[in-house]
Each structure stands twice: as structure tokens, then as C-alpha cells.
Image: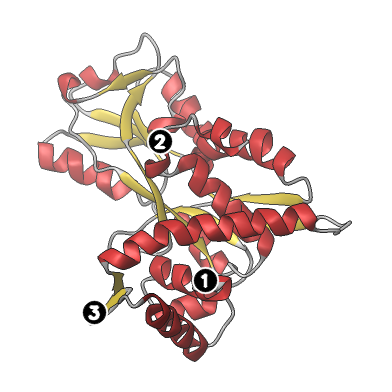
Amino acid sequence: MRHLDSDALLAFVAVAEAGSFTVAAQRINKSQAAVSIAVARLEERLGRKLFDRLPRRVALTSAGERLHHYAQKILSLEDEAIASLSDAAHETRVRLGMPDDYLALFGGALVEAFAPRFPLVGIDLRCGFSCQLESMVEARELDMAIITQNSAEPKGEVLRTERQVWCAGPSRSPETAPVLRLALFPDGCRSKPLVLRSLDKAGRPWKIGYSSSSIQGLQLAVASGDMITVLPESAVPPDWRRLGEEDGLPPIPSLALAIYTFQQSRLAVRQVTSFMRTCFSDAGGTVVEKALCL
């Protein structure tokens, strides 16, 4: 009788999401040889090649893509079973990082849906720029982070794409100024170069009127009335004006939001990761997500 070994599936999923046997081994705290052997045995058992070995990375084959979908479900179900039978009396904590403009998207669901379902898992949240959070994960200062991927050096597992939106305060028209006054995050924000390149390409004059490392600072600047900003779609306040090409503003590339972790072997981290996938992945639909997690 054929069956799928969960340790082999964990190694397979880690390689699929890292695009590298070396990085996958680091993430699940195993040797590269052990990961390679686990994947090879899985391929032998299934009689299918799961990865194409490319010059600088590995990529899933069509069979690997199909297995990846089921492997995530199997591991998630296994985690739930272990958690439901666990006799642990103490709380375990997950150190999670994300840019503060993602709090509107993820924060509420963590409090309202994740916490009741996993009462023994506590979340220690740290906000910062994606480049800082990546370094903190690599230094083991964070267990995991939600980051904006760097397209030149992508890290982590893509969770969803997020549209970027030009926006202004209600009853304000800063987009009509001959020179746009921008309120943006400072250098280090991965969205900022995309915004400025889009304006330059469109020939739209601009200047930085205000810079803040927090979304609250940007909101204060926009509320003054003569500045415009760009936010992820999920972070735009409901009463703000959303602007676009009809207002003379160029389109901006969407952002790839990814889960980045080196601690996938910890049950609590896998539970948070599985929750995020179920609730927020593009494949999982839009944010009816919290209900799906309950």
C-alpha cells in the first residue's frame, strides 16, 4: 500500500518554496543531503519527476505543482491533528514581522480568527521595512515575516499580489498641482522606486513633500490636503479618494507579498504559515478569508 511520508512532504514543500535544496535545508533544520534524499525517495515512490534542476534554482514540474497543492493540505491537516491532541500547558510564541502598512490586511485576522483557533500560540509582532525584516529572519531574530519581495532577488513563498493605489484625502485634489507633492516612505521601502519610476516615465513632475517610516505619518501628511501618497490597496482608508490614470497618474506595478521563514520545522510557525495561506493567498480568494479559517 502506497503512502506519503510527512517528513518527505515537508522537505519537498520547503524546496518548492525556496527554489533551492540548500535554502530549504536551512529552513527546516536538516542537512542538504537529507533533503535531497527525501525528495529523491518521494520521486521514486510516486514514479514522477517533481523538480527540474535549472542552472541557478530548481522549479516544480507539472507533477510537482499538483503534489505541492496536496502536500500543503496534508501538512496543514497533520499540524491541526497534533495541535488538537497536544497536552501542552504552556504557550509557544511566534515572532512575526511585517511592514506596518500590511497590518490592516493581516492584523485583524490574526486577532479575530487565528488566536481563538490556536490559543496556545502567541504572536510577537514587529514592524519594519521588508529588507530589515529579511535580515532579522536570517539572523534568527524573527521566526517569520510577511515581506514585499525584491524582484531582483526574490525570497520566500509568494502569498498574494497587492495592487498599489494612488490616494488623497477626501474632498482634496492634490493631483491637479503642476508638481505633485508626495508623502512616501523613506529609502528602503521597496515600493518607493516603483512609484518614482512610474512618474518619471510618464513625464509627471514631482517632489517629496513628506517622508515617514510609519503609515500614521503618511496619513497625517495626506490629511493636510496638498499631498498625495501610494498605499497597498488593503491599507487605503475607506473615506480617501482613490486616483488613477483618469486623474493623470500612471499605473504602478503590483507588489508580491511573500512569507519568509527559516523555522518551518516548528509547529507553531507552520500553523501561522498555513493560516496565512488559507486566508490570504490569491488562490484562496479575496478576503472572505477569515471565515474560511474558522
Q: Who comes first in sequence, dot 3 or dot 1?
A: 1
The amino acid sitting under disc 1 is His
Q: Who comes first in sequence, dot 1 or dot 2?
A: 1
Left or right of 184 in this view: 30: right
* Pointer 3 residue: 54
* Pointer 1 residue: 3
The spot of residue 293 in percent (x, y) is 58, 38
Q: Say which element carries label 2.
A: loop
Q: Where, by quadrant of the figure, is residue 294 drawn?
A: top right
* Pointer 2 residue: 285
Q: Say which element carries label 3.
A: loop
The amino acid sitting under disc 2 is Gly
Q: Nearer the viewer, residue 123 or 171?
A: 123
Q: Residue lying at the far front in this picture: please name it.
A: 1
Left or right of 58 in this view: 263: right
Left or right of 110 in this view: 86: right
Examine the rendered structure and indicate whether residue 272 appears above or below residue 175: below
State whether residue 153 appears in this view: no
Residue occupying image coordinates x 67% and y 33%: 112
Q: Where, by quadrant of the figure, is residue 16 drawn?
A: bottom left
Residue occupying image coordinates x 60% and y 36%: 109
The spot of residue 52 in percent (x, y) is 26, 76
Q: Nearer the viewer, residue 155 or 269?
A: 269
Residue occupying image coordinates x 67% and y 53%: 80
Label 2 crowding class (10 Å Cα cut-off): few <14, some 14-19, many 20+?
few
Which label sits in the foreground, 1 or 2? 1
CA gap, disc 3 and disc 1: 29 Å
Examine the rendered structure and indicate whether residue 238 appears above or below residue 45: above
